Amino acid sequence: MVISDSRGRDPVKIAKPPFKPQPWTPADATDSIRRMSLDESLTVIWTRHALDQMSDRELFTGDVLYILKQGFVLDDPLVSTRPGFYKYSMVSRSPNSGSRTVRVVAIPDSERFQMKIVTVMWADER
């Protein structure tokens, strides 16, 4: 983030506060994922599976981003196939989900400031 004042002085860079080490508790995961998703510098990586699931459910990238910004992590994380990374399930309704709750499974990387979207499903599906 860069902030400059109205007097034309040189911009001042503000470092992002560090994240806690993973695995996160559900409360910490909710806060961390929301914080990451609200930052414009976040890189989102979409798996083909997630995009196919979204298409099948007539959901859009905006719906997934909405869930990441507004949703809740209710369960403990699952270990990812990549060592040191964890999968978190975030749930919420979205603008295009009607009255159904959507589950987004994401793997956040707070060091590289990236989030991989693994899958998107209705929360009442298995």
Image (cartoon, rainbow, N blue to C red):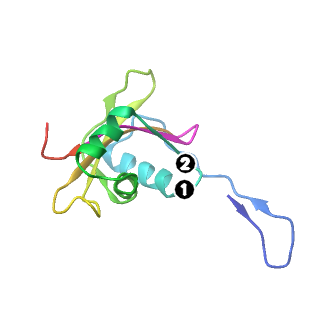
* Distance from the alpha carbon under mark 1 to that under mark 2: 6 Å
Q: Residues within 10 Å of mark 2 (few under 14, many from 20)?
A: some
Q: Nearer the viewer, residue 89 or 45?
A: 45
52 left or right of 5 in image: left
Measuring from the top left, give residue 69's x and y in whole percent: 40, 58
Q: Residue at x 55, y 48 (%)?
A: 42
The quarter of the rendered structure image containing the C terminus is top left
The quarter of the rendered structure image containing the N terminus is bottom right
- Number of callouts in the render? 2
Measuring from the top left, give residue 17's x and y in whole percent: 59, 51
Q: Which residue is mark 1?
A: 39
Q: Which residue is mark 2?
A: 42
Measuring from the top left, give residue 40's x and y in whole percent: 57, 56
Q: Residue at x 31, y 45 (%)?
A: 26
49 in the magenta segment: no
In the displayed structure, 104 sits above or below 10; it is: above
Dot label at residue 64: none
Q: Nearer the viewer, residue 61 or 117?
A: 61
Predominant SS of the magenta segment? strand
111 left or right of 88 in image: right
Q: Which residue type does callout 2 highlight? A: Leu
13 left or right of 102 in image: right
Magenta segment: 110-120
| Cβ–Cβ under 8 Å for marks 1 and 2 | yes
Q: Which residue type does callout 1 highlight? A: Asp
Q: Residue at x 12, y 46 (%)?
A: 124
Say what secondary structure mark 1 lies in: loop
